Image (cartoon, rainbow, N blue to C red):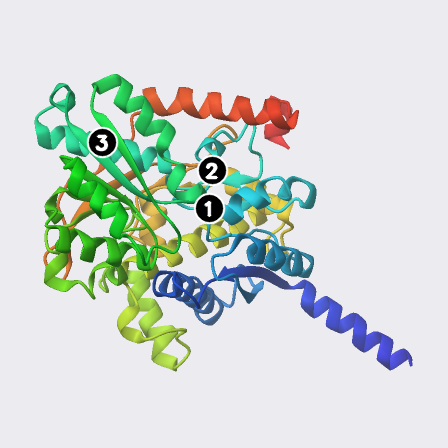
């Protein structure tokens, strides 16, 4: 009996030395072509850190996937099932799931990492203590696209009288950019035409009939999964010029265009991150993970747009644990509360990114109590019929427009939920 008890204690001790990452995924359904490389990138980065570094300062990383099919109810079920296994952060991988979990995580003390998606107002860390929309939100994305179109036209004053349509996924994800677009419409006098597409977006005939009737100067595409390639095929059938189409960064990956091929030529989308097989971290994964037969998906997918985004997300989570260990104890397993502090105190300058092998994949990022985004910039890339090519300089969202909107959105949320803004003391804790 004693031996049995000591065995159990040893087992608990061994488990205590593991940092657990729950991985919400969708490898099935209409969103699988986009969800799969993203999920594979996250897994491969965990495998790299375990294989090459022996974990985070000696703490091995474990993970478990849970299939959501991009459905909010399934996402909440996955969260409830995995949170008790020692989850110290969650990447919901869907805006709808993020909305559903935002009210839950403060009680559970588990931060939500929503890189380039989620609730735009949650950039305000003084209200949204547990949400981290790292690297950008749908407001910053929409702002960059309007700026880019204005530049193409020769200035913001040239937008007056223009017509810009947004073909969007009729869900929290698709509706999230609207306040920013409404604001820019008021400022510059263009007409905004909102055309919803019912999820998952395989049926878009009526949407493109509206495009045909409205004849907008530009079409913004706010799609995900099969919706994107369907939109491009419909644009081709309708005769809408692809070079006048601009997608959000979730509408600008290989699965969106490769089946359309030449038919998508000239189509533009935001690129939140770099990609390709030349970055050092990609080479390390090919060597230490795929080279040892441990790769999660096909080798040719390594370094693709969404795979690389998965790497970034996982790296930021792991670096938040590492940052937390600097304060709370190296070589220790970090709790959700400690990892939240790590996420709020990320300081990844160029030197640090170079050391991590992420040169060319992302730009420096630094978070704080007030700013849970850390940085916001993207480029436009254009499909040439067979590959993506960068076609703009780095774009930055206009803080003068974004900041007041974020504060107003956060204040509204705080009022509805009866929350008070965090004190300076709370920021230090």
**Which sits in the foreground, 107 or 197?**
197
In the displayed structure image, the side of residue 338 where residue 254 appears, left or right = left
Q: Are marks 3 and 1 in contact (CB under 8 Å)?
A: no
Give me the residue at 13% from left, 49% from top: 242
Indicate which disc, 3 or 2, sits on the residue closer to the N terminus.
Answer: 2
Which residue is tagged 2? 119
Indicate which disc, 3 or 1, sits on the residue closer to the N terminus.
Answer: 1
Instruction: Determine whether 394 is above or below 78 in the image.
Output: above
Residue 414 drawn at (x, y percent): 59, 25
Residue 279, quarter of picture: bottom left
Q: Which mark is residue 146?
A: 3
Q: Is residue 17 visible?
A: yes
**Which sits in the foreground, 328 or 378?**
378
* The N terminus lies in quadrant: bottom right
Give me the residue at 56% from left, 56% from top: 75
What SS does tag 3 mark? helix
Which residue is tagged 1? 95
What SS does tag 2 mark? loop
Residue 236, quarter of picture: bottom left
């Amino acid at each position: 009996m004693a031996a049995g008890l000591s065995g159990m204690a040893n087992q608990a001790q061994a488990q205590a030395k593991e940092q657990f990452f729950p991985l919400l995924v969708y490898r099935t359904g209409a969103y699988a072509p986009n969800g799969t490389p993203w999920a594979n990138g996250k897994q491969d980065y965990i495998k790299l850190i375990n294989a090459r570094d022996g974990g985070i300062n000696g703490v091995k990383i474990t993970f478990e996937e849970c299939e959501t099919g991009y459905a909010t109810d399934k996402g909440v079920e996955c969260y409830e099932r995995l949170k008790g296994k020692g989850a110290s952060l969650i990447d919901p991988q869907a805006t709808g799931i993020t909305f559903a979990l935002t009210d839950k995580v403060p009680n559970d003390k588990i931060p939500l990492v929503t890189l380039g998606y989620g609730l735009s107002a949650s950039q305000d860390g003084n209200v949204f203590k547990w949400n981290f929309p790292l690297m950008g939100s749908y407001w910053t994305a929409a702002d960059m696209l309007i700026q880019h179109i204005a530049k193409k036209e020769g200035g913001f004053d040239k937008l007056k009288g223009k017509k810009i349509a947004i073909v969007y996924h009729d869900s929290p994800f698709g509706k999230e950019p609207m306040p920013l677009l409404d604001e820019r419409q008021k400022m510059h006098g263009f007409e905004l035409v909102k055309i919803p597409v019912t999820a998952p977006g395989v049926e878009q005939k009526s949407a493109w009939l509206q495009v045909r009737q409205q004849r907008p100067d530009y079409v913004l595409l706010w799609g995900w999964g099969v919706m994107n390639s369907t939109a491009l095929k419909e644009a081709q059938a309708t005769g809408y010029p692809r070079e006048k189409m601009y997608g959000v960064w979730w509408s600008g990956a290989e699965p969106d265009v490769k089946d359309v091929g030449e038919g998508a030529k000239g189509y533009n989308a935001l690129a939140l991150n770099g990609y390709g097989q030349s970055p050092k971290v990609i080479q390390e994964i090919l060597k230490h993970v795929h080279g040892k037969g441990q790769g999660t998906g096909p080798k040719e997918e390594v370094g693709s747009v969404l795979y690389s985004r998965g790497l970034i997300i996982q790296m930021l989570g792991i670096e938040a644990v590492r940052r937390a260990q600097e304060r709370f104890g190296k070589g220790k397993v970090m709790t959700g509360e400690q990892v939240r502090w790590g996420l709020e105190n990320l300081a990844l300058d160029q030197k640090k990114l170079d050391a991590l092998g992420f040169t060319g994949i992302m730009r420096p990022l630094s978070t704080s109590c007030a700013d849970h985004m850390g940085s916001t910039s993207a480029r436009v890339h254009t499909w040439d019929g067979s590959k993506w090519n960068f076609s703009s300089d780095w774009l930055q969202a206009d803080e003068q427009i974004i900041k007041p909107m974020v504060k107003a959105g956060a204040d509204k949320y705080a009022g509805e939920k009866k929350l008070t803004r965090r004190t300076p003391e709370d920021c230090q804790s």
